[in-house]
Amino acid sequence: MKRSKRFEKLEQRPINLDGFSYEWEEVGLIAMESKFDPKPSIKVENGVIVEMDGIKREDFDSLHKFIADYGIKVENAEKAMAMDSLEIARKVVDINVSRDDVLAITLCLTPAKLTEVVGKLTIVEIMMGMTKMRARLMPANQCHVTNVKDNPIQIAADAAEAAIRGFAEMETTVGIARYAPFNAMALFVGSQAGRAGIMTQCALEEATELQLGMRGFTTYAETISVYGTEPVFMDGDDTPYSKAFLASCYASRGLKMRFTSGTGSEVQMGYAEGKSMLYLEARCLAVTKGAGVQGTQNGSVSCVGVPAGVPGGIRAIAAENLIAMLLDLESTTSNDQTFTHSDLRRVARSVPQLFSGTDYICSGYSATPNYDNMFAGSNWDADDYDDWNIIQRDMKIDGGLQPVSEEAVVAARNKAARALQGMFRELGLPEITDAEVEAATYAHGSQDMPDRNVNEDLKAIEDMMARKVTGVDFVKALDRAGFADVAQNVYGMLRQKVCGDFLHTASIFDENFNVFSAVNAPNTYHGPMTGYQLSEERWNQIKNIPNAIRPEDI
């Protein structure tokens, strides 16, 4: 057949490098509404759920039992479950029905019922639901701060820049596991050099992550994964009960934490049991609620390529974000994993969360160029800052970021690098040279950074950990090095771990360590001109981009 030149041209478009699949229900390769999904049901006897979603209690697996015992409000469950799913869906988007009234219903629903309810909504209605059901009044954003060399000076500088650009939380990870303490402390110091009150974490295996948190290297955690089928849980040598225990370990030590889950993980691991991705994610979120955790990182996250390959998969990701909110959880709504070759598609994937405004729109906007992102690349990165800021400006929305001047960025990066240099010196750690400080101040990424002596760093880390260095030692070292303001900010974050006010749902800090959470700043949206409204000050911050033409310049 003679080829159409138009089709030949279309085939060369980036979108056609993406992977797509037809639905395959038997293995769970379907976003929503699998014929193998259970029908919603519940039966309560003497205050105990004895049947849920067509399964009798004697046939419950560990997830069924955990959800039935801890994840559903039993008192009103039979009444709520008897309501028509369409009626509940309409209440979710009805501005005349309060968020609290919706929660009084949805907290009593089974995973199958929650899945059925959100399945009645279009993507626009899901966005409307997210605007109304988000836990905290104002949206915020989170970023990844990593590099392929595990270079702590670059991490500190990147964190400081990210802080002044507006991120409320920052997450790092490692290429070499033993580098973790340096990465964690660099992120902590760098973020506080940019702005007081930034929460930080280092994503590692859970025992090490908890240890770093207890020693004051980090202030929160979110890499505590839960899954929607029992075999996948067991693959990780875990159960809902062990995860709940782990959650209590973090909280009791003053560490904010959230679970992580997302559509597609069970398919990816081969144990979807023929259920839809969204139904299995609803089970994950019910487990999260039952464990007493304040929030979740969800929205497919690192599995995004799986739902993105099937029809309606991106809608399902937004739907799972909404289910988290219907369970009164903080929802940190992903947008953090690269999944497409198409710039148009990656923006479209982010629109539901960005335009609705979620507790954390990204669970990892890459504050580095993508080649430095050690979380396998992000949907958004440091080269997209201007695009993100201008989209906020175009739509008059708050995406958690703001434009900054080159001078302010250079100053923040330099201060963070010098602060870390001084702290390393005072703690007896390997030298950070002036050349490294200079490079980090102006670097685009790790390609612009000199190499460090990795063996020397790793030996120093081992010695530092053996000396039982803690966050308090960071404070003393920074003060001795002449960075009293950074020391005060680090100390302020350590104090907050003792106070524990930031353990509440959807908590963030401002630069004065004031906590804003679902407790003291709840979402009050009930129609136009209610809920979160951009203040004049915040709107001026968003709209005044450096490269806009000013009347006085004409």
Image (cartoon, rainbow, N blue to C red):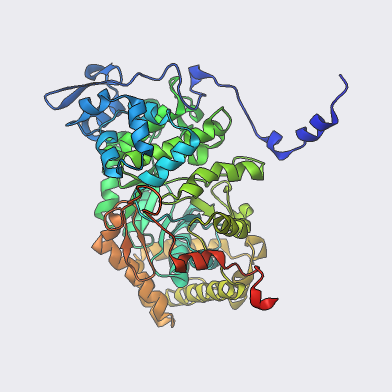
Q: Looking at the picture, does residue 158 appear above or below residue 477?
A: above
Towards the viewer: 446 or 358 = 358
In percent of width and height, residue 490 lies at: 37, 70
Residue ID at (35%, 49%): 525
Towards the viewer: 69 or 393 = 393
Residue ID at (40%, 82%): 480
In percent of width and height, residue 415 lies at: 51, 76
Q: Is residue 523 left or right of residue 423?
A: left
Q: Is residue 209 left or right of residue 182?
A: left
In percent of width and height, residue 363 lies at: 47, 49
Q: Which quadrant does the N terminus fall into?
A: top right
Q: Which quadrant does the C terminus fall into?
A: bottom right
Q: Residue furthest right?
A: 2
Q: Looking at the picture, does residue 299 appear above or below residue 444?
A: above
Q: Looking at the picture, does residue 499 appear above or below residue 76?
A: below
Residue ID at (48%, 68%): 190
Residue ID at (55%, 64%): 543
Q: Is residue 234 visible?
A: no
